[in-house]
Every structure is written in structure tokens, then in C-alpha cells.
Image (cartoon, rainbow, N blue to C red):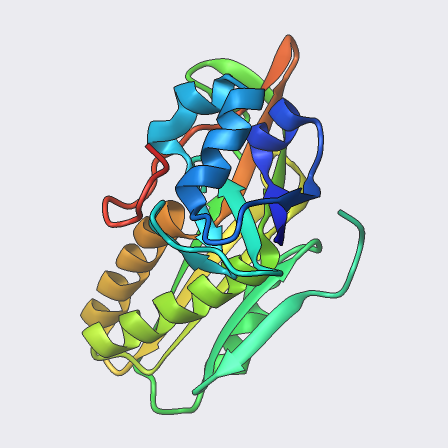
Amino acid sequence: MRVHVLFFGMLREITGVSAEVAEVAAGADLRAIFAGYAARFPRFTELAPSIVMARNHEFADPSTALSEGDEVAFLPPVSGGNNTDPVSVTEAGNYFALTRHAIETRAVIARILTGAEGAVVTFEGTVRNNTKGRPTLCLDYEGYESMALKIMAQLGRELAAAHQIEHVAIVHRLGRMLIGETSVAVIVTSPHRRAAFDAALEGINRLKKLVPIWKKEHFVDGEVWVEGEWDEHVPVAG
């Protein structure tokens, strides 16, 4: 049977392709398809403890069985295309988006205000001019967009359920970013400030370990994919 396989970040560079159609035996699972790529690309074996696999936009255990036409994605550790309109979803008054344009936080806040808020907390992650003293020129962000948006919305639902807040908005940039630009914004509205601060902090911390978005950092003397870490509950390949 045939499955569609996607590669992101450093894994795309290792394989030399962003996507391909793979032939697998009937009844094969994710572990089998990973083994096939590890045989072709030994670096996969080295990276196995930090590679996560997804089936049809859901994190999946290596034992997950495959079906004809499935979409399988190999995802390197999160680190937390073309110019298109933002990909977004509005759900229960919350707002989640991926964009290749500047994030306008005031416009995002206006989307989720209802008048019942006593607090609006905005966290913005910005591009630093160095990493451990090594001067940074710019960053490139890429993501598994359909899955990233789905997980952002799920994260928003969980934040709303866990904290006494009104609404949540999460917006992440993709593409080339320069020093000082905002790469991600997490905005929380609430009747009270403590709940808003707590939810915003939890939101950015979990986003960096769950949402499949990767960062390449460009320096004067080279470039590197930034290796973060997955949430402890996400199953890895090996």
C-alpha cells in the first residue's frame, strides 16, 4: 500500500526531499516505515530518541498501524514557503493563526475582547541578536502547518479549561525573520490578572514543546537548526 511521507527541518535536509510516496507492506506500522528510512539514512537512527512521528495530523506511537493513503510525518525536535494569507481558526471566541506577516498584537486582541475582561496579558517572543554571544543574522521558521494549527487550538481549549480566563489567542510567524521582530504571541483575556498571567506562561511553555514548528538560526559563520525538546508525553521513534 502507499502512504504519503513528509519531512521537516533537519530531517528534510538529511533526506533531500520534503515529501514522497512510500510503498509499505499491508499491515505495516510506523515503526516499520521508520526502520526503512533509518536503513537509507543512518542519521535517523542517531536521532531516533528525539524524532516524533505523526499519522494524519496526530502524534502517534511507533506501533500505530498504517492504512492506504495515510499521511505520515517525521518531526525533529520542535524549537519552538510562499507568501500566502494567514492560516487561522476561530473557536469559541479564541483565535489561532500562522502567518508570514508581522504580528499585530492590538488587532489580535481586538478579535477576542468581549468587554468582560479585567486583564489582558500579552507575551511576545522576539528574535534576539545573539545566541550565547554568537551574533545572529536572522531566523527561518517552518512548520507542519495543518497539524500546528490543530495543536494550537487544542492547547487553547486546555488553557481555557484549566484557568479562569475569557479567551486565548496564539499567533506564530513562519518564514524569514529579522532581529527584533515578533515570532510568536500568546494573548490571554480574563476578569482577573493572576489567571491571565498563569495561562499565558503555561501557553508559551507548552507551545514550545508541542507545536510542530522549527527554527533555523543564521550566523555570520554558519547556520544551524535549533534543537529543542518534545513534551515528555509525546511518543518518540526510538
For this rendering, which residue is in front, 70 or 205?
70
Q: Hey, which residue is sitting farthest front in the picture?
A: 26
x 36%, y 66%: residue: 155
Residue 41 vertical position relative to residue 139 in the rendered view, above or below? above
Q: Hey, which residue is sitting farthest right in the picture?
A: 83
**Residue 116 image offset from top left, x and y in percent:** 34, 91
The quarter of the picture where residue 52 lies is top left
For this rendering, which residue is in front, 136 or 32?
32
Residue 123 vertical position relative to residue 31 in the rendered view, above or below? below
**Residue 197 image offset from top left, x and y in percent:** 26, 63
Number of disc labels: 0
Quadrant of the frame with the C terminus: top left
- Let me know if residue 8 appears in the view: yes
Question: Relative to 66, is 189 on the left or the right?
Answer: left
Q: Hey, which residue is sitting farthest top in the picture?
A: 221
x 26%, y 83%: residue: 191
For this rendering, which residue is in front, 210 or 171?
210
Residue 238 vertical position relative to residue 125 in the rendered view, above or below? above
x 64%, y 27%: residue: 15
- Let me know if residue 78 appears in the view: no
**Residue 68 image offset from top left, x and y in percent:** 59, 60
x 53%, y 64%: residue: 149
**Residue 71 image offset from top left, x and y in percent:** 58, 56
For this rendering, which residue is in front, 67 or 149?
67
Question: Relative to 181, is 158 on the left or the right?
Answer: left
